[in-house]
Amino acid sequence: KAGVTQTPRYLIKTRGQQVTLSCSPISGHRSVSWYQQTPGQGLQFLFEYFSETQRNKGNFPGRFSGRQFSNSRSEMNVSTLELGDSALYLCASSVSADTQYFGPGTRLTVL
Amino acid sequence: TQLLEQSPQFLSIQEGENLTVYCNSSSVFSSLQWYRQEPGEGPVLLVTVVTGGEVKKLKRLTFQFGDARKDSSLHITAAQPGDTGLYLCAGKESGSGAGSYQLTFGKGTKLSVIP
């Protein structure tokens, strides 16, 4: 079974731009969660989608948004990028809270 | 305030030594997971514990969930260079709702095993 894939793996943007990251979950997994990982804060929950509906949202500003398609693939968007948005963005797919499978992440650098 | 506190933050040991990593909280968790993450990659699930007092073994790794389901430990016996990585604990809070898959993560313990 193929694992979770994330594209692109690396991204460099400048302040004020916007970015879209993509995540393809494991086949059959309907839940996709997004996390931001930084050295200072560790992994922080952004949001979770289940069957195209946002089921849970973390404490991030409205510049961070996401969506899920009917095939369970998910995208997250960050608008008006700030330097502090530089991070590793991780996507996880799951069939339960106890077992989440992470992708390799997208490393975003904001200059 | 970090909901899950991991200690130590950094650990550098010689090959063959034993070590224990701790994950503590004042909150009760319905389940707790341990992950290992290598540079440039996503976390890989090692184990999930769900019952207070539960002990699980994975080769040289032993995981324990506290009786009150507020803390957990990871013990590695005879560490090897391949054990090097960032160890993360993560939990699902009790009462967070059956429909929520949101996990709370500790900041991790960075382990280096020197040959």
Image (cartoon, coloured by chain):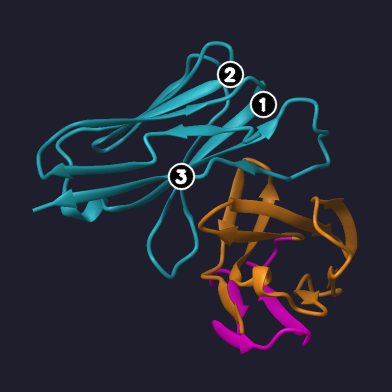
Chain colours: A orange, B cyan
Q: Residues within 10 Å of mark 3 (few under 14, many from 20)?
A: many
Q: Mark 3 lies on which chain?
A: B
Q: Earlier in the sequence, mark 3 or mark 2?
A: 2
The amino acid on which the numbered mark 2 sits, given as a three-letter code, is: Arg
Q: What element does badge 2 sit on?
A: loop
> What range of the chain is rendered magenta?
A1-29
Q: Specify whether disc 3 shares its chain with disc 2.
A: yes
Count of numbered marks:
3
- Residue B69 bears which disc, if any? 2
Residues packed near mark 2 inside 10 Å, few (<14), some (14 to 19) or many (20 plus)? many
How far apart are labels 2 and 1 at the CA level? 7 Å
State yes or no: residue A8 in magenta: yes
Q: Are marks 2 and 1 on the same chain?
A: yes
**As drawn, B94 above or below A10:** above
Q: Pointer 1: what residue?
A: B30
Viewer-closest of A24 and A7: A7
Q: Are marks 2 and 1 in contact (CB under 8 Å)?
A: yes
Q: Tell me the amino acid under the disc marked 1.
A: Ser
Give how far across and how far down residue A26 sits, in percent: 63, 67
Q: Mark 3 points at which residue?
A: B108
